[in-house]
Image (cartoon, grey):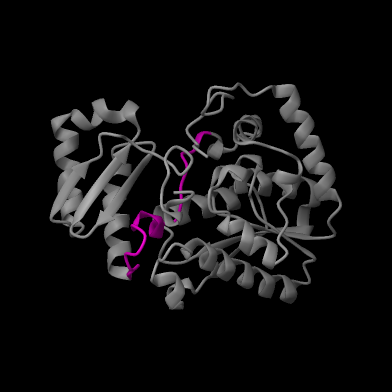
Amino acid sequence: MSEQAGNGAASNGVPCDPAVAEAKEAELKRILAGYTSLAVAYSGGVDSAYLSDVAHDVLGSRSSMVLADSPSLPRSEFAEASALANSRGWDFVVVNTQEFDNEAYLKNDGRRCYFCKSELFRQMKDYAESKRVTTLAYGAMADDAFDPTRLGALAATEHQIVAPLQLARLGKAEIRHLSRQRGLPTSDKASFACLSSRFPKGTRVTLEDIRKVEAAEEALRKHGFHQFRARLHGDTCRIEIDMDDLGKFADPAVRDDVVAGVKAAGYAHVTLDLGGYRDATMVMVAPTEANS
């Protein structure tokens, strides 16, 4: 689902009812209280940050937040996620996932997300066994039922990972509203997916190209673009930005600096997609683009 909604409104314009949201949070707390101990797959995004914060409130030291680190996670995202976890006083753990050692992941044939999530959940299970954690959770929420691939859900089912936000029927607009009430800086954070999602289906994922994508997106981030993607197409970078930011990109100084930064990352050509940023629920896309 699109994560551009703010001020309690969903991306489809349906407002969030605060009373309903608070009732669902009460249900979430009831669900979490039923776990002896819990480890949450934490990414630093809107949903997992909210789930982590509520879990910490309910379970305290019996909860831990597990961040998966790999080349597909930008250093800026890693730093933000780590800073948030530490500032909230969570029991915060980093695991180094090894999906880049998996040929099935690298060939990017449409099931890349499944292999990525499977590696994350495998690492979490190892952590849980070492710490005697009884339950593993991830941040899938009610709106994720619209995911056209459900690859993450498949991996979660196979590894017996629970989705408390879905069980409480919490949707994106409600999670944003409740995050705002908690003072979480992620309440209005744009949607994000791993850097490998910038590769078209069938294009092999390489460390060299991952670094090019990361550097290209940093050229956009430094100018304050909120929702963006730098899509890899050989030696061409196709930029997607929120339509509201087209005016900013039209500023010659901004545009020239972004183009220079993208070319410095290793691209020969830079294009701007006039369709703007689109996620997997807005257009029919290849499976590898889901949740991008």
For residue 247, what is the image quadrant?
A: top left
Question: Residue 258 lies in magenta, yes or no?
Answer: no
Residue 8: image location, x then y, percent? 59, 24
Residue 80: image location, x then y, percent? 48, 50
Residue occupying the point 49% across, 65% down: 69
Residue 82: image location, x then y, percent? 53, 55
Is residue 145 among the parts visible in the rendering? Answer: yes
Question: Residue 194 lies in magenta, yes or no?
Answer: yes
Position of 204 relative to 171 (above/below): below
Position of 14 relative to 40 (above/below): above
Q: Main secondary structure of the magenta part?
A: loop
Residue occupying the point 60% across, 55% down: 42
Residue 70: image location, x then y, percent? 46, 67
Magenta region = 188-206
Position of 79 relative to 144 (above/below): below
Image check: 97 left or right of 167? left
Image check: 234 left or right of 51? left
Position of 235 relative to 2 (above/below): below
Report the front residue among 118 and 184.
118
Residue occupying the point 40% across, 66% down: 108
Report the front residue among 67 and 157.
157
Is residue 74 among the parts visible in the rendering? Answer: no
Report the front residue among 173 and 115.
115
Image check: 257 left or right of 42? left
Q: How many marks?
A: 0
